[in-house]
Image: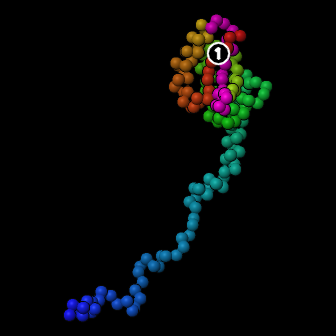
């Protein structure tokens, strides 16, 4: 008797007819891929932007040549090409250096240690007493460099050389 009862049970679903179409079936087609207009414009104009960016960098490096003495080799120019934030920082530093060091000549030199870490040094070629140079560099650091040094990411050092 129990087996007859279990054999006659059904779920109530009629599996002989297909299910009715659902509302979302109409929209199940391949999505049309569109790029947002802003992305298209940026990519379309990328070549011109890169050329303008490079021209601005070259103009800034030429301005640096007016405020600093560069070595004959390409070490400093290569460093500035690899570290694009430092040229602007060097140009911003010029009036502050002049205020602290007077009409001293500033020379740039690039170095690399045994691990490949590169550093650019901006040397004040100081003709006077070392104590006066220390006072000037401390003043420069206190008045401007400490507040702005984060932009160099450790790649730029201002120092002096006695001549």
Q: Is residue 72 left or right of residue 123?
A: right
Compared to residue 29, the image places residue 50 above or below, namely above
Q: Secondary structure at mark 1?
A: strand
Check the picture and name the quadrant holding the C terminus. Answer: top right
- Report if residue 120 lies within the magenta region: yes
Q: Position of residue 27 (x, y in %)?
A: 48, 76
Q: Residues within 10 Å of mark 1 (few under 14, many from 20)?
A: many
Q: Where, by quadrant of the figure, is residue 65 drawn?
A: top right
Compared to residue 25, the image places residue 104 above or below, namely above
Is residue 104 visible in this depiction of the protein?
Answer: no
Q: Position of residue 41 (x, y in %)?
A: 62, 55
Q: Is residue 17 left or right of residue 44?
A: left
Furthest toward the left, the residue is 1
Furthest toward the top, the residue is 129
Q: Position of residue 53 (x, y in %)?
A: 67, 42
Check the picture and name the quadrant holding the N terminus. Answer: bottom left
Q: Which residue is mark 1?
A: 160
Q: Is residue 9 left or right of residue 110?
A: left
In this view, the residue in front, 116 or 88, is 116
Which residue is pictured at 28% across the width and 91% down the height? 7
Which residue is pictured at 53% across the width and 23% down the height? 146
Is residue 13 visible in this depiction of the protein?
Answer: yes
In this view, the residue in front, 128 or 60, is 128
Picture mark count: 1
Q: Is residue 35 left or right of residue 25?
A: right
Q: Where, by quadrant of the figure, is residue 77 drawn?
A: top right
Extent of the magenta region: 113-130
- Report if residue 81 lies within the magenta region: no
């Amino acid at each position: 008797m129990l087996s007859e009862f279990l054999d006659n049970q059904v779920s109530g679903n009629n599996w002989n007819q297909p299910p009715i179409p659902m509302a979302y079936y109409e929209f199940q087609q391949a999505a049309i891929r569109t790029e947002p207009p802003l992305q298209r414009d940026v990519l379309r104009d990328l070549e011109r932007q890169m050329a303008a960016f490079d021209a601005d960098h070259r103009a800034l490096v030429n301005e640096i040549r007016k405020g600093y003495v560069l070595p004959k080799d390409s070490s400093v120019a290569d460093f500035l090409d690899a570290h694009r934030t430092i040229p602007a920082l060097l140009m911003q530093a010029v009036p502050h250096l002049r205020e602290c060091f007077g009409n001293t000549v500033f020379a740039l030199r690039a170095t690399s240690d045994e691990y490949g870490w590169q550093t650019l040094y901006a040397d004040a070629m100081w003709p006077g007493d070392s104590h006066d140079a220390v006072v000037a560099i401390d003043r420069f650091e206190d008045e401007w460099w400490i507040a702005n040094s984060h932009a160099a990411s450790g790649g730029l050092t201002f120092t002096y050389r006695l001549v």
